[in-house]
Image: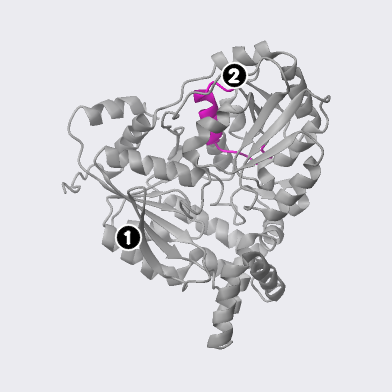
């Protein structure tokens, strides 16, 4: 891969043309605030500062609104076009292509007239979207944030019910996993909405979805079981083929970590099509104060409270450290996965685990200031967790599971500590050692690596966008 710095210099040495960039992502802020949504918003804003016109195409699941409905809005000055995808499909194979939404996508492409389509995720959109853009002569680039191309149940390559990390893609297991996923529930409920049940019952179903989404999901799962909504192993295999076709439609694919790039190569995707380029970050709003010299070590978790993030491993580790040595500070929305959150609170009852709830991402520096060490206990093949970079910027050392992109970022014993994933005993041992050796924390914090600035990262993407257009250079001057 040619050095990106040389391209950046070439771009900045002369006036760059203004580009129209359309970012496509499975959902978006403010309702959804996971890493890829935050990154897409930050990158879009940085590109706007460089003079480009940026629009976000996102999907939203909302049975209270008509399937296929398009709504135009703005988020912090970023234009967003939202398409409602209620998964009203007879089977999973059709859902993954979403042919009835292609007309809406055509309208968005025509209205925004992008010089480049930047795909962050095709989940909830369509695996056929890249090909649609290519037919219109629009270059397509992609950022691989996770494994949604190959994992239809959410992109984490885990089977929660079987406590299994999917190092390979097994269609039989994938079919079982999909039937246990939220997408199956959405599709089953969508089948209810499609049924000829009369206007009054239809309206009642929509009101139920708005007032009690959890109950609606459980009822839908009951109705959907055995109805044909579930995926078959053959459908999973066909989806993998469609994913490879979508991959072939990308002019350029970027993986933020070497680990993610390697994983896709091992899954059969051509390595020469993938470049490794980590994320960029805006400066933190305030520096984190120094660590406490005494008292319990404050081990913090910041992120989504979902099973694959491994918060239960941290809670179990706290139960195994000597009394008074370590306490856990957990930042995250307890409403994202209510059953999992309830299990966490039961396991933490009577132990020094404090649930602080969610916070606006712009306040991440405040959250980091309340902890002595960040714990990243993930049990899935992480990409390049944003929170680790943010901890480095705040000079907060990191303890992370030795898995996926976490191990790419942490130099064991240098700027953090790695431990075997899913091992509460090992994590408890690491935290106990750090609690009794605060000087080691200071040494690791001092060796935190620098991260790429968001503005420099936007310049890198600008260079890549222009590269995909070569030799054609006719872009908008508006």
Mark 2 = which residue?
A: 415
Return the x and y of residue 210 as percentages of the image width and height.
56, 69
Comparing 13 with 371, the one in front is 371
Return the x and y of residue 473 as percentages of the image width and height.
20, 44
User: Can you tell which of label 1 and label 2 is closer to the viewer?
Assistant: 2
Q: Is residue 426 above or below residue 44?
A: above
Q: Earlier in the sequence, mark 1 or mark 2?
A: 1
Is residue 127 shown in magenta? no
Q: How many marks?
A: 2
Comparing 346 with 382, the one in front is 346
Residue 315 vs residue 71: left or right?
right
Placement of the N terminus among the 4 image quadrants: top left
Mark 1 = which residue?
A: 135
Residue 108 vs residue 148: left or right?
left
Residue 38 vs residue 114: left or right?
right
Q: Is residue 302 above or below residue 413?
A: below
Comparing 188 with 352, the one in front is 352
* Quarter assignment of residue 222: bottom right
**Callout 2 crowding tier (Cα within 10 Å): few <14, some 14–19, many ≥20:** many
**Callout 1 crowding tier (Cα within 10 Å): few <14, some 14–19, many ≥20:** few
Comparing 396 with 220, the one in front is 396
The residue range painted magenta reads: 378-396
């Amino acid at each position: 891969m040619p050095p990106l710095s040389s391209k950046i210099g070439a771009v900045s040495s002369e006036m760059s043309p203004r580009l129209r960039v359309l970012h496509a992502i499975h959902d978006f802020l403010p309702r959804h605030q996971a890493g890829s949504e935050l990154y897409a918003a930050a990158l879009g804003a940085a590109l706007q500062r460089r003079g480009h016109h940026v629009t976000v195409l996102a999907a939203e699941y909302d049975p209270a609104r008509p399937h296929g409905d398009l709504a135009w809005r703005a988020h912090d000055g970023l234009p967003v076009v939202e398409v409602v995808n209620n998964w009203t499909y007879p089977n999973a194979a059709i859902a993954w292509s979403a042919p009835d939404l292609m007309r809406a996508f055509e309208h968005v492409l025509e209205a925004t007239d992008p010089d480049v389509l930047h795909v962050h995720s095709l989940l909830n959109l369509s695996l056929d979207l890249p090909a649609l853009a290519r037919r219109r002569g629009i270059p397509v680039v992609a950022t691989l944030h996770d494994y949604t191309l190959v994992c239809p149940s959410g992109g984490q390559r885990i089977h929660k019910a079987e406590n299994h990390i999917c190092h390979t893609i097994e269609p039989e297991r994938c079919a079982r996993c999909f039937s246990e996923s939220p997408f199956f529930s959405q599709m089953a409920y969508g089948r209810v909405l499609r049924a000829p049940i009369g206007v009054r019952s239809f309206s009642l179903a929509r009101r139920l979805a708005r007032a009690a989404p959890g109950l609606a999901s459980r009822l839908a799962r009951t109705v959907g079981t055995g109805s044909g909504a579930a995926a078959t192993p053959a459908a999973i295999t066909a989806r993998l083929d469609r994913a490879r076709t979508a991959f072939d439609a990308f002019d350029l694919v970027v993986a933020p970590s070497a680990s993610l790039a390697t994983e896709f190569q091992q899954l059969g995707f051509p390595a020469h099509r993938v470049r490794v380029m980590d994320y960029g970050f805006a400066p933190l709003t305030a520096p984190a104060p120094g660590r406490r010299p005494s008292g319990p070590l404050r081990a913090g978790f910041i992120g989504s409270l979902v099973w694959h993030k491994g918060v239960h491993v941290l809670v179990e580790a706290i139960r195994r450290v000597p009394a008074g040595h370590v306490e856990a500070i957990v930042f995250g929305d307890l409403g994202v996965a209510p059953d999992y959150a309830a299990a966490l609170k039961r396991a933490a009852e009577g132990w020094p685990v404090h649930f602080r709830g969610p916070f606006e991402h712009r306040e991440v520096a405040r959250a980091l200031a309340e902890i002595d060490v960040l714990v990243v206990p993930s049990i899935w093949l992480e990409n390049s967790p944003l929170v680790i970079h943010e901890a480095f910027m705040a000079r907060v050392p990191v303890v992370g599971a030795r898995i996926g992109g976490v191990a790419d970022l942490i130099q064991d014993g240098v700027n953090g500590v790695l431990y075997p994933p899913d091992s509460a005993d090992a994590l408890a041992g690491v935290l106990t050692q750090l609690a009794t050796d605060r000087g080691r924390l200071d040494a690791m914090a001092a060796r935190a690596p620098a991260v790429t600035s968001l503005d420099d990262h936007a310049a890198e993407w600008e260079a890549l966008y222009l590269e995909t257009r070569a030799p054609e250079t006719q872009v908008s001057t508006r």
